[in-house]
């Protein structure tokens, strides 16, 4: 790493962030324009990027994770760090050899016939070396970077200081950036990648999942040689998506390869279970016969059964052009904080789906992208923490597919893949067909008439619900007022008891005051919670 000294590393990071804080305060006090704020965030992004490259390693990983949070961070800042690459100079071979010996308890020669001394891949947390087992089998050996634990502890201490300061003193609008959530995400991602045993389990999970597939290849794992800091896998040769010459020599067309890629990842996003969260071109290869090779399972996410059902409904709604249902799914998945702007979201989704980028010039596309960013910033949209990995995976796969078939419309390309997946889903197939039928004009006319006839009943239900809510609010508010009145009575009793030297009176009054204060706090909290509940429209 470029900077190994703990104190020097901490000093450089703290200086960077405190200078950022001071600039934000200065712009806030001087009430700068939006254009000036955008310039400031670009400048901050450049300085942030420069420091990351100087310090290297883990901080680049942090920058990569921040770069996918465009829903939380300013566009100017994101634009400067979105193309960060996780390329770190490899460690000395002596250190790697010592790491292998410490983990295995023996010299590497005991298990290996040979191992190359130059890494074939070097990232912030791990390095990959090619080796040959005693039986002649070629393997990929992933070794955790020496001293990385110490560096991570230093960086997390520094970040904890920064997050605490930012959460208490940075003049950022509430709800714009949740610093504690960001820190939790960063910690979760890094700790997950540090645990090679967890990566081994994820690798075995995907190996079992695609065992019967004839289009996917997952490397086998040598469990007996794996430790918390070493992962030994089958060596698989493949072709990168970015290698134009070799990709053109494959027996399948680029469109077929793109559909294969979709058919591998779409089920991961729509079904409960694990999904590959870091599918960049280095982790997805194609074999000489066109099979999709998946590598590096250090970063995986998980989708619950409930969320999977809503995602399936969301995709089905978009394909059926039922944008009302699609927005409802986004609300249930907590991408939308309220349903106040549902009509705007429906129009936005309709425009996005029908949008044809081939009809616009590059300058128009840039302008449109900026306008879309402004619109999304204005709407109550924020990616829930549990879907950050999913967002990263979707965006990365979209980039890979556009690399393969730049002139193809993604939605049209994905329709047959989705329909084929749907055929395997049993009852879900009929649910989707019913959803499609509901989106058709004739059904909408019947549905509108039915809704009109049911309107009086619905109005009565809404009215009753509102009355219940108002009654609940009145009870909580009245109890809070009573507690406050009892606090005043208790304080008067304490004063009178002290003046009249009646110990029993001021002791009882003190107890009453304490209980009333506690009650006032409880009802105050309930009232605040109720107000938040009502604001969110839940």
Image: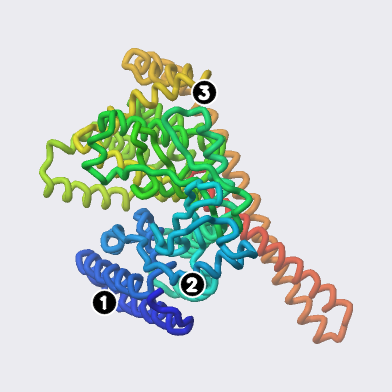
Identify the mark nearer the N-term, 1 or 2: 1
Q: State if disc 2 and disc 1 touch (CB < 8 Å).
A: no
* Residue 459: x %, y % from top left: 49, 28
Q: Is residue 37 above or below residue 495?
A: above
Residue 75 horizontal side relative to residue 285, left or right = left
Question: Distance between the Cα atoms at labels 1 and 2?
Answer: 55 Å
Badge 3 crowding class, 10 Å Cα cut-off, few under 14, some 14 to 19, many 20 or more, is few
**Residue 78 as seen in the image, left or right of residue 301:** left
Badge 1 element: loop
Q: Residue at x 48, y 23 (%)?
A: 456
- As helix, strand or loop, the secondary structure at mark 2 comes to helix
> Disc 3 designates what residue?
457
**Residue identifier under label 2:** 94
Lower sequence index among marks 2 and 3: 2
Disc 2 crowd, CA 10 A, few/some/many (<14, 14-19, 20+): few
> Would you name the residue on which mark 1 appears?
30
Q: Residues within 10 Å of mark 1 (few under 14, many from 20)?
A: few
The percent coordinates of residue 191 (x first, y second) are 54, 60
Q: Position of residue 25 (x, y in %)?
A: 34, 77
Q: Are marks 2 and 3 in contact (CB under 8 Å)?
A: no
């Amino acid at each position: 790493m470029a900077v190994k000294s703990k104190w020097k590393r901490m000093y450089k990071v703290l200086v960077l962030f405190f200078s950022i804080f001071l600039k934000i305060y200065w712009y806030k006090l001087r009430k700068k324009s939006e254009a000036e704020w955008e310039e400031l965030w670009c400048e901050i992004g450049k300085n942030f990027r420069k420091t990351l490259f100087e310090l290297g390693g883990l901080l680049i990983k942090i920058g990569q994770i921040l770069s996918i949070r465009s829903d939380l961070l300013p566009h100017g800042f994101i634009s400067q760090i979105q193309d960060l690459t996780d390329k770190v100079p490899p460690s000395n071979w002596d250190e790697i050899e010592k790491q292998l010996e410490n983990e295995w308890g023996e010299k590497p020669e005991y298990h290996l016939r040979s191992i190359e001394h130059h890494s074939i891949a070097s990232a912030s947390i791990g390095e990959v070396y090619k080796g040959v087992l005693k039986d002649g089998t070629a393997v990929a050996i992933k070794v955790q970077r020496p001293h990385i634990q110490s560096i991570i502890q230093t960086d997390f201490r520094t970040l904890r200081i920064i997050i605490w300061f930012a959460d208490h003193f940075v003049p950022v609008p509430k709800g714009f950036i949740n610093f504690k959530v960001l820190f939790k995400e960063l910690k979760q991602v890094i700790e997950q990648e540090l645990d090679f045993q967890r990566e081994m389990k994820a690798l075995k999970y995907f190996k079992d999942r695609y065992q019967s597939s004839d289009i996917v290849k997952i490397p086998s794992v040598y469990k007996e040689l794996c430790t918390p800091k070493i992962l030994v896998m089958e060596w698989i040769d493949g072709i990168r998506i970015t290698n134009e010459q070799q990709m053109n020599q494959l027996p399948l067309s680029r469109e077929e390869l793109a559909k294969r890629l979709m058919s591998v990842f779409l089920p991961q996003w729509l079904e409960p279970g694990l999904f590959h969260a870091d599918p960049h071109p280095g982790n997805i290869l194609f074999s000489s016969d066109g099979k999709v090779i998946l590598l590096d399972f250090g970063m995986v996410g998980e989708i619950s059964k409930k969320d999977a059902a809503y995602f399936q409904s969301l995709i089905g709604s978009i394909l059926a052009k039922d944008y009302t249902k699609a927005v409802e799914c986004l609300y249930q998945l907590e991408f939308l904080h309220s349903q106040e702007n549902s009509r705007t979201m429906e129009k936005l989704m309709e425009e996005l789906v029908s949008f044809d980028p081939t009809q616009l010039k590059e300058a128009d596309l840039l302008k449109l992208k900026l306008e879309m960013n402004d619109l999304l910033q204005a709407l109550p949209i924020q990616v829930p923490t549990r879907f950050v990995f999913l967002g990263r995976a979707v965006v990365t796969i979209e980039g890979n597919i556009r690399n393969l078939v730049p002139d193809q419309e993604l939605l049209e390309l994905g329709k047959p893949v989705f329909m084929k997946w749907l055929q395997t889903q049993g009852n879900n197939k009929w649910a989707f067909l019913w959803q499609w039928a509901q989106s058709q004009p004739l059904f909408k006319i019947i549905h509108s008439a039915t809704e009109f006839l049911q309107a009086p009943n619905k109005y009565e239900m809404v009215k009753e619900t509102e009355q219940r809510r108002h009654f609940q609010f009145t009870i909580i508010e009245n109890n809070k007022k009573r507690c406050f009145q009892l606090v005043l009575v208790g304080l008067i009793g304490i004063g009178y008891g002290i003046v009249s030297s009646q110990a029993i009176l001021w002791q009882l009054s003190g107890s009453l005051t304490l209980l009333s204060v506690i009650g006032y706090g409880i009802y105050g909290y309930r009232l605040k919670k109720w107000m938040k509940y009502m604001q969110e429209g839940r």
